[in-house]
Structures are given as C-alpha cells and as structure tokens.
Amino acid sequence: MRLDIEDTFMYNSNNLLGNHLKIKIRPFQYFYLQTDFRHLFEFDRINNTSSQLNFSHFTLGYDRIRLDKFNLGWNLGVSYIGNDVRKAGFTYGVSSDYFLNKNISFSGIAKWSKINTRPVNAFELQTKYHKKNYFFALGYEHLKIGTPTYNFITLGAGIYF
C-alpha cells in the first residue's frame, strides 16, 4: 500500500493562476485510485473582478506495462466541474513514467472527458527530482475546458508513504 500526495502551483500569466492537488492511493502494486483537484483563478485587472473554476478527475488506474525504467497504463473514471456548472462526465486516459535514474523521472498524463457535450481535457508533462520519500516537480499542463484552452508552467512538491 502506498499513498502519494502532490500539490502544484500553475502559472499562465499574472491574470491566470491555478493550483493542482493530486492524491494517489495504491492498494495494490498495479492498480491505483487517483483524485486530481484543480482550482483556477482568473483576474480582470481592468474591471477589478475575479472568477474561479474548480474541476476534478476521479480515476481508477492500471499500470499495464511495468518495466524497470518505464511504466505505461490507462485510467477510467469521472470528471466533475463545480461552480455554476455542477456536472459530471466519463473520463478516460493514459499515463506513462520513465525513470532516468534513482533520483530523476519523467511522466506524462492525458485525460479526456466530455461534460455537456464539451471537452474537459487535461495533459500533463513533468520532471521530478526524488529524495527519500518526497519529490520536487517542474512541468507543463495543457487544459481544454469547453472552447478555451489554457497552458500552464507548473512547480510543485509531493510526498509518498
């Protein structure tokens, strides 16, 4: 059994920021449950207003291919948009990890879903530096929520037990 907790700051511009909290529970070696909670903040400096959007993915993952330095798997679950939308949809995706050495890894995750016939997609690329049971992450996230798309540089940290 293993528990991973990661929190990432997402930066697009001074007007668009976000936070991504990821919790992964591995009750078995190959299967895991994962929750991704994103909170986006948009600031309109001209009108002195701000808006927020919360959305989440709740997935069951399976690492189908597990090698010494490479993992490839799929995930299925539910996506949910909060705020005024309050709708859910089916989510599916793929994930991979490559371990360069003991301390450095690269990961990529793609999740697709539809809510109200509109896409709610998330793509992540990360480089992690591992030390004992914690890590630091630097990455990129591309989000498509309905019609608009957003690109973020990410910086975060995590711990696993």
Image (cartoon, rainbow, N blue to C red):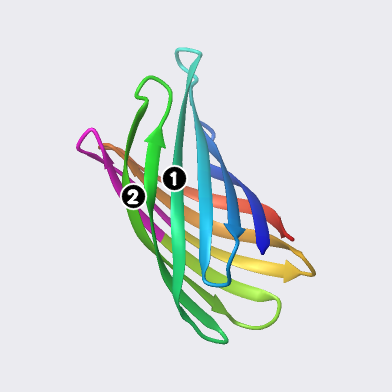
Image quarter where the N terminus lies is bottom right
Q: Is residue 57 magenta?
A: no
Number of dots carrying numbers: 2
Q: Is residue 12 visible?
A: no
**Left or right: 137 with respect to 159?**
left
On residue 47, the disc is none
Query: Which residue occupies 30% across, 47% down?
Result: 113
10 Å crowding of disc 2: few (<14), some (14-19), many (20+): many
Most common SS among magenta residues:
strand
- Of pointers 1 and 2, the one earlier in the residue sequence: 1
Q: Quadrant of residue 21?
A: top right
Query: Which residue occupies 60% across, 82% down?
Result: 100
Q: Is residue 15 visible?
A: yes
Q: Are marks 1 and 2 in contact (CB under 8 Å)?
A: yes
Image quarter where the C terminus lies is bottom right
On residue 91, the disc is 2
The residue carrying mark 1 is 57
Taking depth in this image into account, of 57 and 100 the one nearest to the observer is: 57
Q: Amino acid at mark 1?
A: His
Q: Which residues are magenta?
A: 110-123
Taking depth in this image into account, of 28 and 147 the one nearest to the observer is: 28
**Measured from the top left, where is residue 7 in percent x and y?**
64, 47
Query: Which residue occupies 52% across, 55% down?
Result: 33
Taking depth in this image into account, of 142 and 87 the one nearest to the observer is: 87
Q: Amino acid at mark 2?
A: Thr
